[in-house]
Image: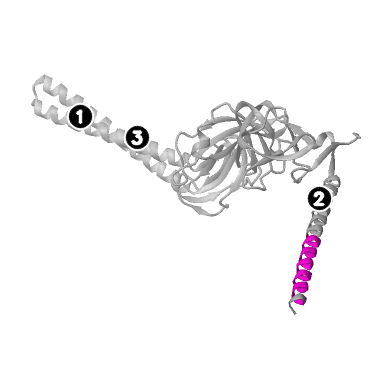
Amino acid sequence: MKRWLKWIVIAVVVALLALGVLRALSARKATKEALESQQAAQKAQPTIALTATDSVQAKTMELSQGLAISGSLKAASSAFVKARVAGELQGLTVREGDFVKVGQVIAHVDPTESRARARQAQQQAESARAQVDIAKRSFDNNRSLVEQGFISKTALDSSIATLSSAEANYRAAQAGAEVATKALEDTVLRAPISGQIAQRLAQTGERVAIDARIVEIVDLSRLELEASLSAADSLTVKVGQTAELTIEGAAKPVAAKVVRVNPTAVAGSRAVLAYLALESNSGLRQGLFAQGTLATGNARVLALPLNAVRTDKPQPYVQLLTNGQVSHTTVTLGVRGEADGHTMVEVAGIPENAEVLSGTVGPIREGTLVKRQGAK
């Protein structure tokens, strides 16, 4: 019985040893197969072909820094024609788009009442003038009588006071006549500037009040862009700086120059208004929307095209070409600007002349092999 158990133990041990050997051989085979698969995958690693336009080099260059601006066009000179006296509006014939010249009669306010007041004031002035003549003759007579000793000096003093009062009344009456005459002249509404009618705000036959707006005139010979700037941006804007504007409806960009910067900020928004005069206004109208870039300075920096910097990771990076492979390198961005008609950005973290995939290529997996088209 004991001999039989001994052989059983020996058989179990042999079986366990054989199983361990089989497992070791199997693991070795799996490792070998995995290594072979990895080597095969490396040999089959994809390779992309690049053209000359698929990569760019980081270069030190002069960037033209700019500030994005926008706003509506406004006429540098515009005016509202207002009624200076109350009454019925007459003879208003101009309409929107009509040209008028400075001093041209636009309309009338019914002058009947003003004319009557002017006559009344003039007659009162004439009456006051007659009183002055009477007081002067009385004064001359009394002065002669005093010199001859027929009346006392007190009577002469009374004549002087009467003459002075009459002269003062005459001057007051003259001033009243001038005011009435001015009111009569104000019934004629004239264009204060040359330009075009932008708005017609009243109609013939209406009764208008003092300071009622009749028409608006704009002079389109000089147009300006009123740009709203933040407090920080306003510090970089100076008179004389130039900009290129794109205006809705205009086929070509229009050059403009900063002519004024408001010395105070707008209450509430704290924005600062800058005014840019357009160098050409052919066919443009007040109120059109314009936007563009205002040149504020230059900077010499190491730069890349803005689209070559990728931002689909937490930190901006570029797809650097090194030894025929793509590597992702994190970069620090600086100032932006224009160079050769392209938007460029300052980069730090890569050497000068480093070759980077352009933005048109798209994202490429790190480690991907690259080759030039036409190269074997």
Mark 3 or 2, closer to the camera: 2
Amino acid type at mark 2: Leu
Q: Quadrant of residue 254?
A: top right
Q: Percent x, y for residue 43?
A: 85, 45
Q: Kindly tell me whether residue 333 is visible in this rendering.
A: yes
The residue shown at (56%, 50%) is 201
Amino acid type at mark 3: Gln
**How many residues crowd around disc 1 within 10 Å: few (fewer than 14), some, or many (20 or more)?**
some
Mark 1 or 2, closer to the camera: 2
| Residue 287 vertical placement versus 154 (above, below) | below
Range shown magenta: 4-23
- Disc 1 designates what residue? 138
Sooner in the amino-acid sequence: mark 3 or mark 1? 1
Amino acid type at mark 1: Ser
Sooner in the amino-acid sequence: mark 1 or mark 2? 2
- Disc 2 designates what residue? 35
| Residue 328 vertical placement versus 298 (above, below) | below
- Disc 3 designates what residue? 174
Q: Is residue 310 left or right of residue 35?
A: left
Q: Nearer the viewer, residue 268 or 130?
A: 268
Q: Is residue 371 left or right of residue 261?
A: right
Mark 3 or 1, closer to the camera: 3
Q: Nearer the viewer, residue 357 or 19?
A: 19
